[in-house]
Amino acid sequence: MKTKVTLPKKVTIGAFDVELVLVSHELSYHLAEQQGSFNCNPPYKVYLDQDIIEAGGKDALNLVLHEMMHVGYYQYSLKDKEEEFVVNAYGNFLTELMMRSELKNWIFSFGKKI
C-alpha cells in the first residue's frame, strides 16, 4: 500500500520561501475567478483551489506547476528577456523545484497514476 504524499505547506526555491495556501473552491472560482494565484510581494504565497488539490492527479499537478512557473517568472525577472535566457532560467528553476524543494516528493508521488 502506497502512502499518500501531502502537499507541503511551504516551498523553498532559491532565496524564496513560498507558502502554499489552499482556499475553498467557492472563493477560488466565484470571487477570484481562477484556480490558483501567486502573490509576488513578501510574504510570498501561492493560493490553490482546495478541491483540485485534494482530488489529485494531473489537474492538481498542472495547477501547482502552473503557479510555481509564476514564481520562477518573478524570481528570475523574465519580463522582456530573450528566449534562450527564459529557457535557461526555467530549466534551472524546474531542476531546483523537482530535485531540491519540498514539492519534490509530492510531484513524483503521482508516478504512473496520471
Image: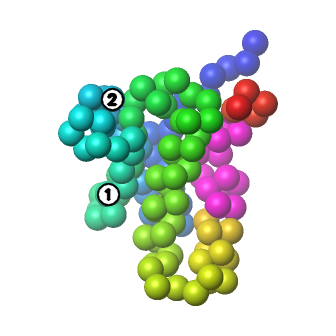
Judge left or right: residue 7 versus residue 51: right
What is the number of the mark on residue 39?
Answer: 1
Q: Pick whichever, 85 or 16, lies toward us.
A: 85
Q: Is residue 49 above or below residue 75?
A: above
Answer with left or right where residue 86 lies relative to residue 73. right
Write the residue at 56% across / 50% down: 65
Q: What is the x, y in percent for residue 6? A: 55, 29
The Cα–Cα distance between marks 2 and 1, rounded to whole angstroms, is 18 Å
Residues shaded magenta = 94-109
- Left or right for 36, reference 57: left
Using the rendered image of the protein, determine whether residue 114 is visible from the camera's viewpoint.
yes
Q: Mark 2 or mark 1: which comes first in sequence? A: 2
Image coordinates for residue 34, horizontal then vertical, percent: 34, 44
Residue topped by disc 2: 25
Q: Main secondary structure of the magenta part?
A: helix
| Percent coordinates x, y for residue 113 in the rendering | 73, 27
Image coordinates of residue 23 in percent, x first then y, are 32, 34
Identify the secondary structure beneath mark 1. Answer: strand
Say which residue appears at 48% left-offset and 69% top-offset. 73
At horizontal 45% and vertical 46% (from top left) the residue drawn is 10
12 inside magenta stretch: no
